[in-house]
Amino acid sequence: MATSPCSSSGVSSSSSSGLGADAGLEIRTRSVEQTLVPLVSQITTLINHKDKPKRSDKTLQAIQRVGQAVNLAVGRFVTVGEAIANENHELKEEMSVACIEARRAGETIAQLTDVASLDHPESDSHITIFTDKTGVVKAARLLLSSVTKVLVLADRIVIKQIITSRNKVLATMEQLEKVSSFQEFVQIFSQFGNEMVEFAHLTGDRQNDLKDEKKKARMAASRAVLEKCTMMLLTASKTCLRHPDCESARINKDGVFHRMRLALEQVIEIVTDSRPNGENEMVPISIYSGIKEFKNKVEGLRENLYFLSKENLSTMLEVILEHTEDFTDSAYTSHEHREHILELSKQAKMELEQLVSVWMQAQNQKTKDLMEDLEVAILKTCQCMNELKREVHSAATSLAADLLKYHMDHMVLKALKITGVEGNLEAVAEYTCKLSEQKEQLVEMCRLLRHVSGTEPLEITCIHAEDTFQVTGPQIISAAETLALHPSSKIAKENLDVFCEAWESQLSDMSMLLREINDVFEGRRGEKRVYLSLPRPGEQAKIAKLGLELHLLTSDVDSETEKWEDQENEIVQHGQGMSSMAYSMYLFTRGEGLLKTTQDLFHQAEIFATEGTKLASALHAFSDQVHDDDKPSLLLEAEKLISMCKQLQITAKASVQGKSATFTKVDACILKTRNVMTLLCQLLPLCCKLLRKNKAGNDCLKPAPPWREDRMRTGTNAHTPERRAETFGIKSLENHVTNMTFLESK
C-alpha cells in the first residue's frame, strides 16, 4: 500500500519502504502534494515486491512494466521541467540539477526492474531489484526527492506570477494617486480594474491550493479587503478629483490606498511565506486554544507523571485567566457573566492546587489510592475548565447577538446620509460620535468572539472583522464630512453610500460568523461560508471571479454615463438601469443584496436582457441622427446587443433541476450578463462621441482613445507571457506524473 507522500514540512517516509525526501523541501500546496501520490504509489509497489518469496512470470512482468512506466513518465516529466528551466533563467541551475537526478533515478529503476526475461532473477551476474536490496530504495528516494524539488521549483513560477501581478497593481495605483484630470483617471482606472481581475484570479487559485487552513483564511481576508476597496478607491478618488481642496476627501482617499497596500503586502507574505525583516507572525492566544492545551497537559498525567513540571502547568493557567480579564474588564459584559467568570477562575486555581498536591505525592509513592485521587483531581480540573469555557462562550455570543440585532437597522448610517445631503455639519458631527461609539462596541465584540471562535481560521476571521470596523468607521466619518461640506455633490453622496455598504456588509458577515462559532461550540462542523451554497469550492471561486469582473464593469459603465451632458438621454438611462441590475447580480455572488435565491437572479437576468433590448431600439433611433459614414458601425453594435440579450433571455428562462444544473445556469447567466456589460462599455463612449460629432456638425473631432478596446483584448489574450508561463507550471507536470496511475499493484 502507498503511504501519504507529504507532510507539512516535506515528504513523509514510508515505514515499509524507507522512502523519504529532502526535509528542506516544504510542500505548501495541495497540487504539488497530490501530484506525488501516483509516483509514491508506483514506487511503493516496486519496493514491496522484493520481500515476496514467490515470483511468478506474471509478477516479474508486472514489476518490469511498472519500472518501465515510472521511467517513461519521469522522462516526460523531466522534459517539461527542462522547458521550465529554459524559460526561467533564475531557476535554470537548480531545475537542471533536479531534472538530471530524476532522469538518472528513473533509468536506475528501469534497469533494476528489467527482470521479466531472466530465468534466474536472483543471479549475481545481473543486478536486479532482487539482488540489490538497497539499490532500488536509494533510487526511489532520489527519484522522489528530485521530482519533489522540480515541483517545488515550478511552484515558484506561480509565486512569481502573483508577485509580478501585485507589482503591476501597485504601479498603476501610484499613477491613480497622482492623476489630476478626470479623463486620465478613467483611463488608468480601467487598466487598474483589469489588473485587479487578473490578481484576483491568481490569488484565488492560490488560496484554493494552500494546504494550511490558517493561511487560507488570511488569504481570504486580504482578498476580501482588496475586492471591497476597489470600489472604494473609485469613488474616493473621483470625490477627490471633484473637490481637490477638500481635506476630508483627501483623508478618505489616502485611507483606501493605504489599506489596499497593506492587503497586497499580506498576500505576498502568505504566498512567499515570509515577513518583513524576518519577523515572526504574532497571533495572540485565545482562551479556547489555551484551555484546550491546558486540558491536554492535565490529562497527559494519566500516562506520564514526569513529562512536565508543576510550574509549567501553573503558568498555563495564569495565561488563561489573564485572558479572561478581557471579559471581566469589558464594559459590555453583563454583571451576571462577569461574576460567574470570576467565580470559575477562582475555582480553577483551587482545583489546580489540589491536583498538584496529589500529583506530587503520586510521584513519590504510586499507590492505588493516590492514583484514584489523581484521577478525581484530573476530572474536577477539566470539568472546571469546561465550565469556564462555556461561560466565556455564552458571554461573547450573547453580547454579539444583542449588538448585531440592535445595529441591524443601520439608523446611524441613514442619519449620516440625510444630514450630509442637508449640509448640516453640526448634526453630522453628532452622528459621527454615535458611529464611533458603535465602532468601539463592535470592535470589542470581535475581540471577545476571537477568544471563543474554536478554530484558527475563525480566529483570523474575527481579527479581520475587527480591523474592518476599526478602519471603515473613520472612513465613513470622513466621507460624511465631505458630503456635508458639498451637499449637492452627486459623487460625494455615492462615495458615502459605498463606505456605508461596506459597514453593512461586515455586519451581515458577523451574523454568519456567529452561527459558525456556535456550530463549532456545539460539536457541529461549522460550514464555511459559500456563494449560493454551490457544490464544490472550485465552482464557488469561479462565481466569485465572474462577480468581481461584473462589479468592475458596472464601475466602467457608471463612469461612461457620467460623461454625458444630457443625463435624461434615453441611451444613458437604459445604460444606468442595466448597470444597477448588474450590480445587484454581483451582490448576489457575495450572498448580499436584494436577490436572495437563484430564481431571483434568473428573473433579474430576464429584466436585464429586456432593458438591453430597449437600449438596442434606442440605438436604432439614434442611428437616424448620425452621419451615413458612422451609421453601419453603430447598427452593427446594436445588432450584437440584441443577439446577446436574446441568448441571455433564453438561458434565464430555461428550466433546470438539481444543484449542479442550477449552478451551471447561474454561471451562464452571470457570464452572459458580463458579456453584455462589456459591449455596453464600448457602446457608450461610441455614442457619446457620435453625439458630440453630430452636434458639432463636422468630422474634425479626434477619434476616441483605444484604451477600452485594448483592455478587452488584454482580458482575453491567452498568449501573454503570464499565460504562456502557466502552461509550463504545476499542471503540465501533474499530467505526466499522473500517467503512472494506469498500472496498479497486483
Image: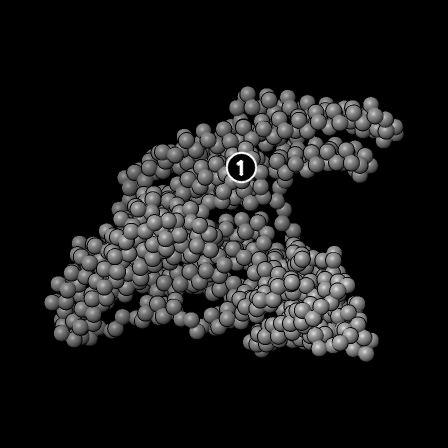
159 vs 262, nearest the viewer: 159
602 vs 290, nearest the viewer: 602
Q: Secondary structure at mark 1?
A: loop
Compared across the picture, whether 536 is left or right of 380 comes to left
| Residue 467 drawn at (x, y percent) | 50, 44
| Amino acid at the residue labelled 1 | Arg
Check the image and name the residue furthest to the left. 624
The quarter holding residue 376 reads: top right
| Residue 580 drawn at (x, y percent) | 28, 51
502 vs 144, nearest the viewer: 144
Could you tell me which residue is drawn at 31 percent across and 62 percent down? Answer: 675
Q: Residues within 10 Å of mark 1 (few under 14, many from 20)?
A: few
Compared across the picture, whether 381 is left or right of 529 comes to right
Q: Judge whether 124 appears above or below 239 on screen.
A: below
Check the image and name the residue furthest to the right. 364
Q: Judge whether 534 appears above or below 387 on screen.
A: below
Pick the quarter of the image with the C terminus: bottom right
Pick the quarter of the image with the N terminus: bottom right
The answer to whether residue 575 is seen in the rendering is no
Could you tell me which residue is drawn at 78 percent across and 77 percent down? Answer: 126
The quarter holding residue 87 reads: bottom right
Q: Judge whether 56 appears above or below 236 on screen.
A: below
**Which residue was labeled with disc 1?**
524
The answer to whether residue 618 is seen in the rendering is yes
The quarter holding residue 320 reads: top right
| Residue 579 drawn at (x, y percent) | 28, 54
255 vs 67, nearest the viewer: 67
| Residue 119 drawn at (x, y percent) | 75, 76
